[in-house]
Image (cartoon, rainbow, N blue to C red):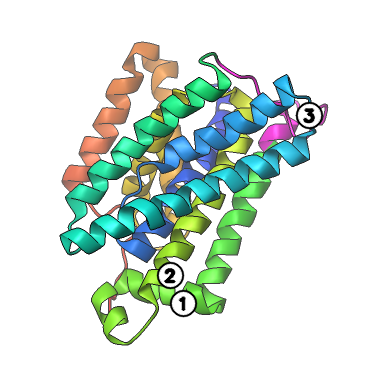
Amino acid sequence: MSAQLWVSVVQIGCFFGLVALGYYLVLEGADFFNFALGPFAMFSGLTASWLMAERGWPLGFAAVLGIAIAAVLAVVTEVALVRPIDARTGGGELPSLIAVVAVLFAVEQLAGTLFGRQLMPGRSWLPGLDLDLGFVKVDGQTLVLVACTLVSFTGVWVWTRKSKYGRILRAVGSNREAARTLGMPVGRVRLVAFALAGLVVGLAGQLFSAKAGVSFQSGFGWALSGFLALVIGGTGSVWAPLAGGLLLALAQTFVPYYLGSASLDYAVLAVAILFFALRPNGLFVRKVRV
């Protein structure tokens, strides 16, 4: 077994974990699955790649703009779509979910129209910085991806425990109606959750597209992978999405290695069915809900 495969597991798992963290934030703050987060990540990565390749922008400016656009898309989705639909339907989940799925496909088609429909290569954030450990090689972009993932999860973990809105987010996630009854600003927390999720997936799109490239069709696959990572990891801890992402990446990496690439889709489906049937709340579940 090649040790290099474990590097692939870590880098793919970190990406899945970041997208799942975006799902986690919106689920905790709004009790809602925002399936458009995958396309938001794609739009972020594609924006930066296109600006650098076609307009000659420096990496830093292109990356910041891409992340900001992902956050804006997330906020606009909440303010202009999800919130009004919730108000008209009395909090019904299905109409909002259908609307977000429509946003998913709309963002993909918009990206294809604006940036073209071919795979856009990325640019490493640390070119030329490769670690050769003898038994395994780690490129600079993988190091950046792992570092940014750890910083992001640590930052969200600290934020949920130390900041006002972070603690309110946890309260809303534990019991939304009780939080509303106690006079907590649930609507404002929803907006913060959507915005922060947009920033996280925008960063994820930047980091992964710099490694693997990105196209306008990447969004749906990224949305599905992030969702499955959250299903596997659960919502019992801020770190649960990362655990789920790593386990999903483990299956996606080693199953094709042993059984062939044709088995990949079956492996992902099998993992999903297994957790939905036997562990529907994921690996990590809150023991106490107020």
**Cα–Cα span, label 3 and label 1:** 40 Å
Q: Residue furthest right?
A: 128
Residue type, mark 2 in image? Val
Residue under numbered circle 1: 167
Q: Residue at x 48, y 64 (%)?
A: 192
Q: Residue at x 31, y 87 (%)?
A: 182
- Checking the image for residue 130, the label placed there is 3
**Label 3 CA crowd tier, 10 Å (few <14, some 14–19, many 20+):** some
Q: Residue at x 35, y 58 (%)?
A: 27
Report the magenta residues as a range: 119-142
Q: Does residue 136 appear anywhere in the picture?
A: no
Q: Any magenta on residue 139?
A: yes
What kind of element bears circle 3? Answer: loop
Q: Is label 3 or label 2 in front? A: 2
- Checking the image for residue 189, the label placed there is 2
Q: Position of residue 236 (x, y in %)?
A: 36, 63
Mark 3 or mark 1, which has the lower sequence index?
Answer: 3
What kind of element bears circle 2? Answer: helix
